[in-house]
Image (spheres, rainbow, N blue to C red):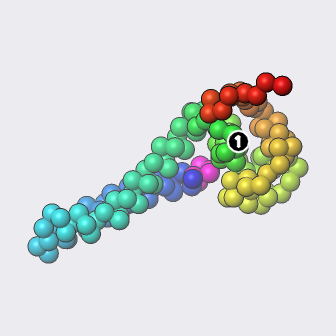
Amino acid sequence: MIRNEKEYQEAVERILQEKDRLAKQEAELKAMGLGPDNVKRALDPMRSFHEQLEEEVRSYERLKRGEFDEVLNLRGLGQLLVSLRIARGLTQRQLAEKLGVHETQVSRDERNEYHGITLERAAKILEALGVEVRSRVERLESEPAEVA
């Protein structure tokens, strides 16, 4: 996951470099007399990495526009917190200042996607980000309710 503008710029640059590298590699393989199936097989890992990087760039761009994935049963809360910081246009340093912690703490937390975070701490981060998260409880229809 791309977490800041620097990583985003590096990823965009890397995509351009990878496109050139893929084209050159494909030309070299064809020049060696390899058939289409062998060329494809040789390039598939590079293409897969390239597509993954492109998806990360698109995902970061969606976050910058304020488009988020849904959080279900609090799974993905950590990623949502990172996403909200990005969407709000804050750096890790700025969030750390708002929380009264060192920037390395925010960096470490985000790298681990806030694994094991308490709800109280999540609430403080949401407050520092100036956002509100609302939830809705929906009953699963797998078992009928017991009548007391």
Residue occupying image coordinates x 49% and y 48%:
57
Q: Circle 1: is it few (<14), some (14-19), or many (20+) Cα within 10 Å?
A: few
Residue 31 visible? The answer is: no
Q: Which residues are magenta?
A: 2-6
Q: Which residue is mark 1?
A: 74
Residue 71: image x %, image y %?
64, 38
Residue at the bottom extreme?
32
Front residue of 117 and 6: 117
Front residue of 83 and 94: 83
| Quadrant occupied by the C terminus | top right
Residue 142: image x %, image y %?
62, 33
Q: Main secondary structure of the magenta part?
A: loop
Front residue of 76 and 84: 76
91 vs 42: above or below: above
Residue at the top extreme?
147
Tell me where residue 145 sits by quadrant: top right
Residue occupying image coordinates x 43% and y 50%:
54
**Residue 30 vs residue 72: left or right?**
left
Residue 88: image x %, image y %?
68, 36
Residue occupying image coordinates x 83% and y 48%:
118
Tell me where residue 22 sits by quadrant: bottom left
Residue occupying image coordinates x 20% and y 66%:
39
Residue 83: image x %, image y %?
64, 42
Please name the amino acid that badge 1 sits on.
Leu
Q: How many marks?
A: 1
98 vs 104: above or below: above
